Amino acid sequence: MLTEIDFPITLTLDPENGILDPCPQITPRYLSDLKMMFKDQQVVDEILKEENRLIYEIRYYPFRTSKSDMALAVTRIFPGSIGGEYHMTKGHKHERDDQPEVYYCVKGEGFLLLDTLEGEFQAIPWRAGTITHIPPMWAHRVINTGTDLLVFIGVFHLSAGHDYEIVAQKGFSYRVYAVDGKPALIRQT
């Protein structure tokens, strides 16, 4: 249960490794958690026979006061690919259709994919220092296309909620693959 905090809170972030302190909740996402997000299911199954690799993790700090709620999430996406498709977050839409989010890329390089899941799509190139406002009702997913850790911060209202299922069902309009050693957006059919 989250307690209400009606006084200032200060956190620290180590930008090199994406460690937030204090951090009351860490959510790891392993390949088995993301199995259906990757296109090449045969490669996923082959990898899972050997290892259940950690793809990314989220470090949360909820700020719930008597009058409002906010949250800070620091996500660390490890470099790598599955069947040529770069490591990615699960992706989600907010359950409440009036809730935006702000993402800030602290370290690494990749893409922020934005998709209405109804025809509108944007792929925003990301590197350290990029800040993106994500409007309400846009699904969002981050892709690590680099050879190092990608670290980003998300700021949102706790009451926004996360809908992962719609993304799993509909998918994004494009996927990001390594083609000749460089990231390429490939339209999904």
Image (cartoon, rainbow, N blue to C red):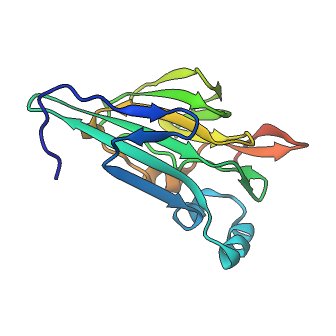
Q: Residue furthest bottom?
A: 49
Is residue 137 in view from this perspective? no
Q: Residue furthest right?
A: 180
Rendered position, 6 above or below 51: above
Residue at left 70%, top 41%? 148
**Residue 81, percent across and down?**
73, 54
Looking at this view, is 173 or 23 the one in front?
A: 23
Left or right of residue 66, residue 22 in this image: right
Left or right of residue 152, residue 23 in this image: left
Picture quadrant where residue 43 is located: bottom right
Picture quadrant where residue 110 is located: top right
Is residue 168 in view from this perspective? yes
**Residue 117, percent across and down?**
52, 40
Picture quadrant where residue 186 is located: top right
Total numbered badges shown on the rendered structure? 0
**Residue 18, percent across and down?**
51, 39
**Residue 126, percent across and down?**
64, 27
Q: Residue furthest left?
A: 66
Left or right of residue 53, residue 136 in this image: left
Looking at this view, is 188 or 46 the one in front?
A: 46
Residue at left 62%, top 25%? 128
